[in-house]
Image: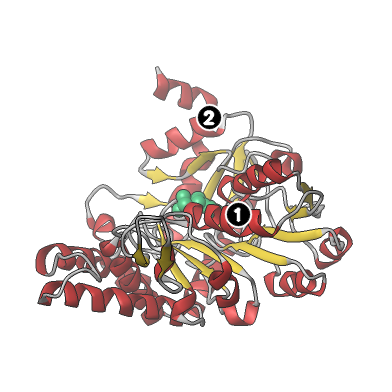
């Protein structure tokens, strides 16, 4: 069980007097003091570049940075040599598409994906497919927008070289059966690339057990700072892959004829000065989540999600698009009011939600609507947050929204 009262005290933004109700953690999470302190400590106590200095501060920053990599690796049960720090899921996913996809795909090969993908997951593959004349195919989803093993098995065939899928949909919150999808993909000699941006913050992920080829996630959705993310890749693929960026820190030597000797994985992928404070903040966020326990995080969110759905069902002015969801992402609309107008009305009552298409622009083929309000829950949310959200939602009318605008 989570002690949410205690948790809320750790988040400075929740301890102001403005009564913020934050229901947009899928966009970015709030940050606990432990993470803010880790970032501050780097700037106040040991600012130095990493792996480039032979003085005390640089050695200290380097050691903490290396330990952070081990901490991340341990959190997802892989080796530290398989963890590449990037600027976020978008950078991680682009890197796989361009540096792995372009290399192994040939004209006529198929990239199998879904219509629930976030732009950062699918757009790089559209580009890659165009460049080499590969085909994009979609797994038919069931009527709730879920990939089923049955549909996936039917969609799979021997021309499929790469499967690109989200672990948890950022619009509908459904959790895809990644372990089974990986097994089926590998049975067909394919590779599976998973966008874990909405999964890692909310549940214990064991990448060795899932047996995926690549997995991407962002720090800022899991209590860490913005500007840092992770690309996990199986060591055998990373060793073969060339980096997207070249520069300082990633090469052992080069000469004026342009011969470059790259460092080993993962250093060869991290050219230039990284987000040192971001990586240290990510490690602090992982410590914080580990202390709470990922099972408790998941249980809390599932309980709140159930509560929210029950309350929403009692309202007759609301349409819910994922009524069977178990995770903390709920997509809805107020009947006959544009989602952005409702979001502005909620904001007027200090309630932050996301509205729009949530960067999943082809999902409208599945849920028959382009824009929704997305409510996303995390460890610091309470039943009281939900009660207030429901109270305001019940009360919203088109006239009230218009009054706010004019
Ligand atoms: C499912 C999913 N994938 C990828 C991303 C992109 O993450 P970032 O903007 O941190 O690169 C997001 C962000 O909202 C997301 O929800």
Between 101 and 345, the one nearer to me in the picture: 101
**Label 2 CB sits under 8 Å from any ligand 1 atom:** no
Query: Where does the N terminus fall, quadrant-wise?
Result: bottom left
| Real-space CA distance between mark 1 and mark 2, rounded to the nearest whole angstrom | 45 Å
Quadrant assignment, res 151: bottom right
Q: Residue at x 54, y 47 (%)?
A: 374
**Residue 267 at least partly seen:** yes
Q: Secondary structure at mark 2?
A: loop
Query: Where does the C terminus fall, quadrant-wise?
Result: top left
Is residue 106 depicted above or below 75 in this figure? above
Mark 1 or 2: the one toward you: 1
Which mark is first along the chain, 2 or 1? 1
Q: Position of residue 343 (x, y in %)?
A: 47, 37
Residue denoted by label 2: 397
Between 219 and 63, the one nearer to me in the picture: 63
Q: Residue furthest top?
A: 406
- In the drawing, does residue 373 fall left or right of residue 155? left
- Label for residue 97? 1
- In the drawing, does residue 99 fall left or right of residue 349? right
Q: Secondary structure at mark 1?
A: helix
């Amino acid at each position: 069980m989570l002690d949410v009262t205690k948790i809320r005290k750790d988040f400075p933004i929740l301890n102001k007097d403005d009564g913020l109700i934050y229901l947009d953690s899928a966009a970015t999470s709030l940050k606990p003091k432990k993470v803010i302190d880790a970032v501050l400590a780097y700037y106040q106590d040991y600012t130095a570049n990493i792996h480039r200095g032979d003085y005390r501060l640089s050695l200290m920053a380097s050691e903490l940075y290396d330990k952070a990599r081990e901490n991340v690796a341990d959190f997802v049960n892989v080796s530290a040599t398989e963890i590449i720090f990037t600027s976020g899921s978008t950078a991680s996913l682009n890197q796989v598409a361009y540096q792995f996809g372009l290399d192994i795909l040939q004209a006529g090969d198929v990239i199998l994906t879904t219509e629930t993908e976030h732009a950062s997951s699918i757009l790089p593959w559209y580009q890659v497919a165009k460049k080499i004349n590969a085909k994009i195919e979609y797994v038919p989803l069931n009527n709730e927008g879920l990939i089923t093993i049955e549909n996936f098995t039917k969609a799979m065939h021997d021309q499929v070289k790469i499967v690109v899928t989200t672990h948890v949909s950022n619009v509908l919150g459904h959790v895809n059966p990644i372990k089974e999808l990986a097994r089926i993909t590998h049975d067909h000699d394919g590779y599976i690339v998973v966008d874990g941006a909405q999964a890692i913050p909310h549940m214990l992920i064991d990448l060795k057990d899932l047996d995926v080829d690549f997995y991407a996630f962002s720090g800022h959705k899991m209590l860490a700072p913005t500007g840092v993310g992770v690309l996990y890749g199986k060591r055998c693929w990373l060793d073969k892959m060339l980096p997207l960026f070249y520069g300082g820190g990633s090469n052992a030597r080069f000469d004026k004829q342009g011969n470059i000797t790259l460092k080993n994985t993962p250093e060869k992928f991290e050219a230039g000065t990284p987000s040192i404070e971001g990586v240290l903040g990510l490690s602090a966020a992982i410590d914080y989540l580990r202390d709470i326990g990922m099972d408790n995080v998941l249980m809390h969110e599932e309980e709140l999600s159930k509560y929210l759905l029950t309350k929403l069902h009692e309202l007759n002015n609301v349409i819910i698009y994922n009524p069977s969801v178990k995770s903390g992402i709920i997509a809805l609309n107020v009947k006959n009011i544009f989602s952005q107008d409702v979001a502005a009305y909620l904001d007027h009552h200090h309630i932050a939600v996301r509205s729009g298409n949530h960067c999943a622009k082809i999902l409208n083929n599945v849920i028959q609507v382009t824009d929704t309000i997305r409510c996303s829950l995390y460890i610091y949310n309470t039943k009281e947050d939900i009660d207030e959200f429901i109270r305001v939602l019940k009360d919203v009318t088109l006239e009230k929204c218009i009054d706010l605008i004019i």
